[in-house]
């Protein structure tokens, strides 16, 4: 079998961002509306700082308002909740993103619950997770699974209906919403995790395999059905023999590329789609809040 087609998330995300920028310009021109995204960063986690910097940059490049709130790591939980409430009440803010992780003394669940569901562009609020689970079109969908779904729908021109999908991982951020999205597309979905018996055999049954488990190169070539499409959500930094480090996914890219029909690389696959979908969600939120017809995300 020939080597797998590379699903280029970097190129795909550029198309999504260009579409978002066009939608933003139309909202400004015809509705006098500039969508606004507020990003809250608590503490000085290096990875979080990079993510936030990229989000702010791309928000502004798409013509949206970017509001950034940096707070010291010793901020009290109540102070953070008060900030979130003020953003809920600010009409210039259409989307709110509180960068995770938060310091140990702050409950992430409480902070997520405090965000107004209609401004929850991360899609983590229990109301949005419930809407997604019941197949409602009103759900704000978490950005990473949404990006995965968009790439899958682009690859399968005939649609996803009837495909057998396996999601490796059951996190609230990726695994569970990914399974719900695929089920809503009429896939037959299996979620596997650390307690699954014979996990390799379950993976081998998949037409679509989504890996989101956080274990470097866990998915080997003999776990993958020939001709399957593999979406690798993992981002893991490992040390090479020369002492330098490199980023790898949850999938053994070299081996699986010889078996799969298509695969996302790490880096350059799912990662760029996450921010693009965050921008798309912010436009969707702005339209809903102002009772304007919302654009299609696919």
Image (cartoon, helix red, strand yellow):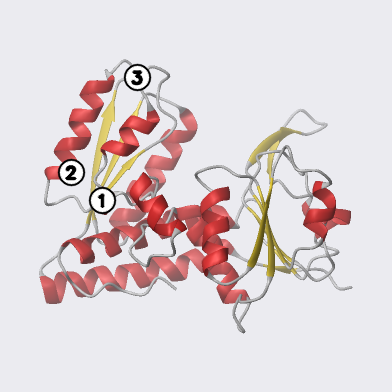
Mark in the foreground, 1 or 3: 1
Instruction: Pick the quarter of the image with the C terminus.
Output: bottom left
Q: Which residue is mark 1?
A: 119
Which of the 4 quarters of the picture holds residue 53?
Answer: top left
Residue 258 at x, y percent in the picture = 85, 63
In the picture, the disc for residue 88 is 2
Q: Tell me if label 2 and label 3 are in contact, CB under 8 Å.
A: no
Q: Does residue 167 appear to the left or right of 22 in the view shown?
A: right
Measured along the vertical axis of the image, is residue 79 above or below residue 60?
A: above
Q: Residue at x 73, y 37 (%)?
A: 195
Sort mark 1 into few (<14), some (14-19) or many (20+) by Cα contacts within 10 Å: many
Foreground residue, 225 or 201? 201
Residue 196 appearing in the image: yes
Element under disc 3:
loop
Residue 275 at x, y percent in the picture = 43, 54
Q: Residue at x 31, y 49 (%)?
A: 120
Residue 31 at x, y percent in the picture = 12, 72
Sort mark 2 into few (<14), some (14-19) or many (20+) by Cα contacts within 10 Å: many
Q: Residue furthest front?
A: 134
Measured along the vertical axis of the image, is residue 157 above or below residue 239?
A: below
Residue 220 appearing in the image: no
Q: Earlier in the sequence, mark 2 or mark 3?
A: 3
Q: Which residue is mark 3?
A: 73
Q: Earlier in the sequence, mark 1 or mark 3?
A: 3
Could you give the CA–CA distance between mark 2 and mark 1, rounded to whole angstroms? 7 Å
Sort mark 3 into few (<14), some (14-19) or many (20+) by Cα contacts within 10 Å: some
Q: Does residue 236 appear to the left or right of 132 in the view shown?
A: right
Q: Tell me if label 2 and label 1 are in contact, CB under 8 Å.
A: yes
Element under disc 2:
helix
């Amino acid at each position: 079998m020939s080597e797998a087609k590379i699903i280029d998330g970097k190129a795909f995300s550029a198309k999504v961002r260009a579409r978002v920028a066009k939608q933003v310009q139309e909202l400004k021109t015809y509705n006098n509306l500039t969508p606004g995204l507020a990003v809250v960063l608590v503490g000085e986690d290096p990875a979080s700082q990079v993510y936030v910097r990229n989000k702010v940059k791309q928000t502004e490049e798409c013509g949206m308002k970017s509001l950034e709130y940096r707070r010291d790591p010793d901020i009290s939980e109540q102070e953070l909740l008060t900030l979130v409430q003020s953003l809920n009440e600010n009409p210039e803010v259409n989307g709110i993103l509180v960068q995770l992780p938060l310091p140990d003394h702050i409950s992430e669940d409480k902070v997520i619950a405090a965000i107004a569901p209609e401004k929850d562009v991360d899609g983590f609020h229990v109301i949005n997770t419930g809407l997604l689970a019941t197949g409602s079109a009103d759900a704000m969908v978490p950005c990473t699974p949404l990006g995965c779904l968009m790439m899958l729908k682009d690859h399968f021109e005939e649609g996803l209906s009837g495909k057998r999908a396996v999601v490796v991982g059951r996190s609230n951020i990726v695994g569970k919403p990914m399974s719900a999205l695929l089920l809503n597309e009429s896939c037959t979905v299996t979620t596997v995790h650390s307690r699954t018996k014979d996990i390799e055999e379950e993976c081998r049954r998949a037409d679509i395999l989504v890996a989101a488990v956080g274990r470097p190169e866990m998915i080997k070539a003999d776990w993958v059905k020939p001709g399957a499409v593999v979406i690798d959500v993992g981002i893991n930094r490992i040390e090479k023999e020369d002492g330098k480090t490199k980023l790898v996914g949850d999938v053994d890219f070299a081996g699986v590329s010889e078996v799969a029909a298509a695969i996302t690389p790490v880096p350059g696959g799912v990662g760029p789609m996450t921010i693009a979908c965050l921008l798309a969600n912010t436009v969707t939120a702005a339209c809903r809040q102002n009772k304007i017809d919302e654009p299609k995300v696919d």
